[in-house]
Image: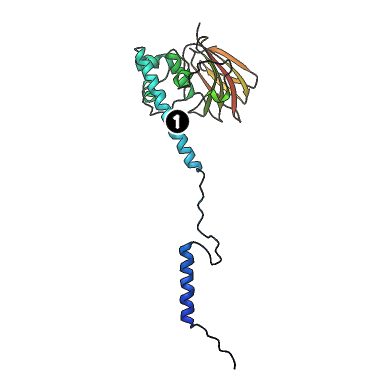
Amino acid sequence: MTPTRTTAPAGRRSSAAASGARTSAKSGKDDDGSDRSPKTTKRAPTDTALAERDADAAEQTMLLVGARIRAMRLRQRLTLRDVAERTGVSVSMLSMLERGVSTASVGTLVAVASALGVHMYDLFAHKDGADPSPVTRLDEQTVVSLGEGTTRRVAHNDAAAGLELAINEYDLGGASGPTATHHDGREFGLLISGELTIELDGQRHVLQPGDVIAYSSDRPHRIANTGSERAVAVWVNLDES
């Protein structure tokens, strides 16, 4: 006798297959038992997110710096006009700086700090060292990158000697500020690379690598990168003795 084979109707086979697919979908596994659940990966912050974070940090820093400038000015019973006359920075600019609603150039901060009897270094928060070392590590140095395409790294500050040593970097077309400023003290600059033009009392002095310039800071001055590459210079601000 020929054996008979029982075959499920097509409709039942489709139902069974659909049922198995639903079961596999619910379990998150394929028919062979392998896991096919969707994988989640952490995405690195985008350039836009990083830029927004840096902008927020810079804004908070300027709010604190502005508040510190205002406190110093009021403590010395100086008006905005007094500071403006000492620096060449307009009253409106000083007001916006104190309220943290404007990003000041490095040159403006240097001038305002000097008008208040301190260095730019003193406008920013620093960790107090119980046992100060003669060495200032790179990661301990204050770096300020604000308007006009200039970054100033304060390598050393000596309040007792009235000296601030900095490394200034100027982007293409970067400058110490939009206009010339003046303040107390003396300045000494050594150009390491690139080209800088120092406007001093309306006269232009072009520096090449290795050139040094020295002048009294009470003369209106502005520093600008007029070359074809990023410029780097060592700058010393010295209080009047």
Compared across the picture, whether 86 is left or right of 199 comes to left
In the picture as drawn, the residue positioned furthest to the front comes out as 1
At which x and y percent is residue 78? 35, 13
Binning the other alpha carbons within 10 Å of mark 1 as few (below 14), some (14 to 19) or many (20 upward) gives some
- Which residue lies at the image location 48% right of the left edge and 23% below the top edge? 106
Which corner quadrant holds the N terminus?
A: bottom right
| Residue type highlighted by circle 1 | Ala
Number of numbered discs present? 1
Residue 27: x %, y % from top left: 47, 62
Quick one: 59 or 135, which is closer to the camera? 135
Q: Residue 241 in the image: state x and y as whole percent.
A: 50, 5
Residue under label 1, please give it. 58
In-front residue for pair 203/151: 151
Does residue 78 show up?
A: no
User: Would you place residue 130 above or below residue 229 in this image?
Assistant: above
Residue occupying the point 42% across, 20% down? 89
Residue closer to the observer: 70 or 158? 158
Nearer to me, 30 or 170: 30
x, y (%) of residue 237?
53, 14
